[in-house]
Image (cartoon, rainbow, N blue to C red):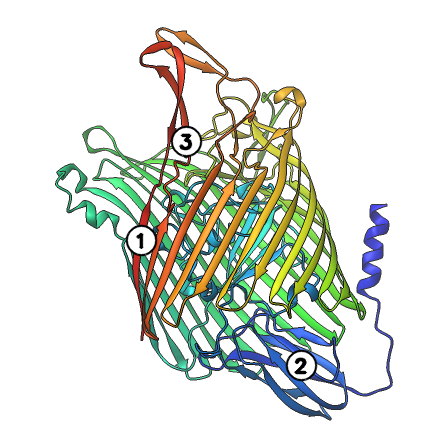
Amino acid sequence: MKNYNICFLFFFFFFQIHATTQQRFTVSGHITDAKTGEDIIGATVSIKEKPGIATISNAYGFYSITLPAGKYQIVSQYVGYLTQIQPVDLVQSAKIDISLNELSRELKEVTVTSQRKNENITTTNMGLQRLKVKDINNIPVIFGEKDVLKTIQLLPGIKSAGEGGSGFNVRGGASDQNLILLDEATVYNASHLMGFFSVFNSDAIKDLSVYKGNEPAEYGGRLSSVLDIKMKDGNAKEFGVSGGIGLISSRINVEGPIVKDKGSFIISARRTYADMFLKLSNDSSMHGTKLFFYDINAKANYKINDRNRIYLSGYFGKDVLGYKDIFGIDWGNSTGTIRLNHLFSDRMFSNTSLIFSNYDYRINIDMIEGNKMNIISRIQDNGIKQDFQYFMNEKSTLKFGLNSVYHRIIPGVVTTGESISLKSLSNKNAWENAFYISKEDRMLNNLNLEYGLRLNSFSLLGLGNFYSYDANGNKTDTVSVGTRQFVKTYLNIEPRVSMNYLLDANSSMKFSYARNTQNLHLLSNSTSGSPTDLWIPSSNNVKPEIADQVSLGCYRNFKDDLYEFSAEVYYKNLQNQIDYKDGAELNFNENVESQILFGKGRAYGLELFLKKKYGRFNGWVSYTLSRSELKFDAINNGNYYPAKQDRTHDISIVGIYELNKRWTLSATWVYYTGNAVTFPCGKYEIDGQTMFYYTDRNANRMPAYHRLDLGATWTISDHSSWSFSLYNAYGHDNAYMIDFRDKESDPTRTEAVQTTLFKYIPSVSYNFKF
């Protein structure tokens, strides 16, 4: 049956549209911001004389529409910009670049989305959330830092991994099941300062999209979601400097033209300075403490000619924690992307990318008599990606391409100060390749269909010894493999299909099915994640994780698209899931695969979303009802049990009110059921030391969490503003951790001690632009 389905999909790929005798021509070009020259992603280009015929500008602002010869009016729209109507007499193919003017402050509607008014109704995308950074600047967050990762946690189906953290879980998936891309490069650890900040400086980001497991075929590699983040291109019209000064960090942003209207650059930098305040402490022991992070974003682009444009972008970030020369740990990401856009014709768009990504950490320990020990770990990617987009006609678009990545994982090396290696775990090398093809069709006036296939190949490569283990973790075999020799190869086919049926102009029903596979796995016993968590590839013991997700949704807009409502249900079946044996040792263990258990899982839920998109008051309400469960033969007697990220209820309420031209007020309130945890069920004593014992895993719950955040933005002029926020405004004691210990007054009894991390955190920052 599986083979028949694949053949059926391939039949559609190569099914050609019926020939027509009427001559047809193509209108194509780029859509940009008239003020800055930045490409506009997701702008709508429609034909006034042909209702229902429209296209959307791609990730580089390119659009293409093929029409019969004739006279038309091209309508270009993007939320927050003035609509532009341009007449065209189509007697031959024409290149028309479109520059849209942003609405003035007097006219501008306060929005929280970058979508056109009814995109949620008309597109095939399910489980997709889009945000534009300038539209979320008023949402209050911890420490006053505008943070895109914390903002997406306010959307349905996307849950915070913990108090104040930037980690997130999507539709019941683990945190490592989210693919995070920054200009196409993978970011393996998106957190600063143990998760309280994300690595994404909002000044450098133009656009982001979150696909909740229903992503198009061009994406792959993770089970739960894809977070695709695009950096700003820089102002191609004039030079400018902007930034902000806050209590925790400061940032600066410089941009301008390389050659006016042909090329531009942008450089953004941010640094915290908690360590500087520690130097002012009266406690001299704090003077040598290191506690800061920094990040730098840089991007440049240049238009070679009308058919070729090149981009160069990079990110560099580092966290540093330490005490004098006694102990220190630093970790960070670096990424780099070189991209070439090329137009083969007015209907064939190509993008070629060379991609680099690196995440590493280093622990420094001062041993006896000044000897130093260093512990180093790294995961590094080098890859190439080729994408094609062919605008076949006004009803069909074809996408296809390939992606090849070489993964190099250094799980751990211990050296002395003289770089003498004391211990080293075997390096892991892998080669991952993917080919995809997808097609979007308007089958009827009210039926849209997008379907595709992704073929994924993952190969574990030598050099080294590779072990096999039985179900009890005992070593059964050892194989020695030479450099770049193949150890194990997995081949997976991932079908994707999404369908949208328009009930009327204001409502639609959608259905989608997607299979995703994952070949890189994060080993962590921590709920929120740690910089020293270990990535491992699929191997002869560890099989690729597989998820099959089915979704069904209804969508409805009200009052001329002023209000948007959606309800989605989903069911996700999970194969080859990973959990750990009781007492598993994951750190610096050559036989770490012997500590792993393999099983299956399921996740299902209901997501409700109501949003008011325009006007002086806007915002949204989201509610998620969900379950995420795992099943392992060796855990809980082989019964299903809650995954640690399982939460039954999750509610977010966001409100933004433009009081006047100077003041904008905002508030968010969140509530969610506590995560699943394992509490002790008894205790015993050994040599006077109390020991706790446990039975069923994740059989308990943390207390429910709720919090109110308040914010206000005071706009002094077009060049400066003040932002104020109050995190946890009513000071609720939310549980960050619960420890169990003997009660001091009666050691025969046990007490639970709750740790609360944050209460009443006020923040203020000054923002400037000139």
Rendering coords of residue 319 (x, y %): 34, 48
Q: Is residue 95 visible?
A: yes
Q: Quadrant of residue 540?
A: top right
Mark 3 or mark 1, earlier in chain: 3
For label 3, the SS is strand
Of discs 3 and 2, which sits in the foreground? Answer: 3
Res. 387 image quadrant = bottom right
- In the rendered image of this protein, does residue 266 appear above or below residue 327? below
Q: Give neighbour class at mark 1: few <14, some 14-19, many 20+ (Cα, 10 Å).
A: many
Image quarter of the N terminus: top right
Image quadrant occupied by the C terminus: bottom left
Would residue 113 appear left or right of 392 to someone viewing this image?
left
Residue carrying label 2: 346
Q: How far from the left and from the top, in percent, is residue 767?
A: 32, 66
Mark seen at residue 763: 1
Furthest residue to the top? 687
Residues at marks 3 and 2 touching, judged by CB atoms closer than 8 Å: no
